[in-house]
Image (cartoon, grey):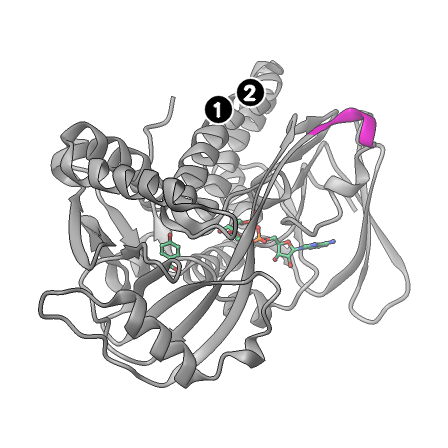
Amino acid sequence: MRTQVGIIGAGPAGLMLSHLLARYDIDSVVLEARSREYVEARVRAGVLEQGTVDLLDETGVGKRMHDEGLVHEGIELRFDRASHRIPFPELTGGRSIMLYGQQEVVKDLIAARLAAGGDVRFDVSDVRIDKFDSAEPVLSFQEGHSSNRVELHCDFVAGCDGFHGVSRESIPRSEFTEYHREYPFGWLGILAAVAPSADEVTYTYTDRGFALMSLRSPQISRLYLQVDPDDDIANWPDRRIWDELHTRLAIDSEWSLTEGPVLEKGITAMRSFVLEPLRYGRLFLAGDAAHIVPPTGAKGMNLAISDVAVLADAVAHWYDTGSSTGLDDYSTTALRRVWRAQHFSWWMTSMLHRFPDDDPYQRQLQLSQLHYTVASQAASASLAENYVGLLRG
Ligand code: APR
Ligand code: PHB
């Protein structure tokens, strides 16, 4: 079997890449280890930067997002039992964000690829990448219950298979540099069938740790609590989760948190990670396969999409002109944005969480930073422009 671009992983990165390439009439095959049902149901974050919204729109996959997503023109920061708003449009030249779950983006992209006759294969196993340092890399894999290996010859391979994928592992250790930061906490997230108690995404710093209120629709709330990264979700019956949310989110003015049935819950560890470079011969890494941010800046999906936007243009330029300049620049161009998001996500995380070894001095620094961020126009604008996403280029 042959294709132009072999793509491993049907998350936002792999699906969007296949979609963008198709718009340039470039063939691709997407190989996904999980089932379609599984990837469409996987609950992840849900904040789209303006640039991500624009790209989904421009490429014809924005309709349901506009019907069902929620445009938000700011966020709230809570600390010292008071709430402060950071308004986005007036600080960023009219830009805002869209709340729309990552799995909804995934559903829309799968539907678009299949409607256009795209080749997306779910439930494949044991994907291997060979000869990516040659002009014709080969992907091989097993399909369904068959024990035969299928070979897929490609011009290029895109490793879009997330943090636990096979792409990164296929690269010799001597070829790359890794940058890491582990955080001594995780997030316990719940999806609840209740109208959101806050109008906007609300980040809260308290003595007992961080809490976040977000939403998916006028009927569905998404809430998070900072917890020990090794904590077991079995230690958190719904009653304990709501009690802790009430305590951390409390403010002195009139406000209350409304409870509802918990539809889903889980604990996620937090880390920062970057692998450099993003290119190894004809293998290109994109999204979580190459970099992870803690969710505090809501950047994960946006980075995955911006990586593949750069990559699709570079690949198209190569087919068009035979010039490899775009491909040669891919890693540097994508990493510039990645490192900005790394810094922003690390900064938000450091400002808003309790660290096990922090001391009163450290806590005063966090509070001072929070006060400055909401009081200074320059500091608010800096948060706002990073949150809505820096313009490309
Ligand atoms: N073979 C085939 N598919 C694989 C393999 C493999 N060996 N390993 C992983 N996959 C698939 C996963 O099942 C998943 O569907 O690759 C896909 C990777 O998708 P994501 O993890 O969603 O990564 P990405 O597309 O880069 O999107 C990044 O996802 O984790 C969130 O916060 C992150 O929002 C960010 C976004
Ligand atoms: C979410 O809605 O899931 C969400 C919002 C903001 C974040 C992280 C997650 O920073």
Near mark 2 (Cα within 10 A), the count class, few <14, some 14-19 or many ≥20, is some
Residue 26 vertical placement versus 208 (above, below) = above
How far across and how far down the image is residue 113, in percent? 51, 54
Residue 276 vertical placement versus 162 (above, below) = above
Q: Residue 175: say if magenta.
A: yes
How far across and how far down the image is residue 233, in percent? 55, 75
Q: Is residue 3 left or right of residue 331?
A: right
- The secondary structure type at the circle numbered 2 is helix
Where the C terminus falls, by quadrant? top left
How far across and how far down the image is residue 317, in percent? 54, 21
How far across and how far down the image is residue 243, in percent? 35, 79
User: What secondary structure prevails in the magenta region?
Assistant: helix
Residue 24 visible in the shown view: no
The residue range painted magenta reads 173-177
Type of the residue with mark 2? Thr
> Which residue appears at 60% of the width and 13% of the height?
323
Choose top left, top right, bottom left or bottom right for residue 344: top left
Q: Circle 1 is placed at which residue position?
A: 336
> Which residue appears at 62% of the width and 17% of the height?
328
Residue 331 visible in the shown view: yes
Residue 319 vertical placement versus 374 (above, below) = above
For the residue pair 104 and 236, the one nearer the viewer reads as 236
> Which residue appears at 80% of the width and 39% of the height?
170
Marks 2 and 1 close (CB-CB < 8 Å): yes
- The secondary structure type at the circle numbered 1 is helix
Choose top left, top right, bottom left or bottom right for residue 315: top right
Q: Residue 131: say if magenta.
A: no
Q: Circle 2 is placed at which residue position?
A: 332
For the residue pair 264 and 321, the one nearer the viewer reads as 264
Circle on res. 359: none
Type of the residue with mark 1? Arg
Distance in Å between CA atoms under marks 2 and 1: 6 Å
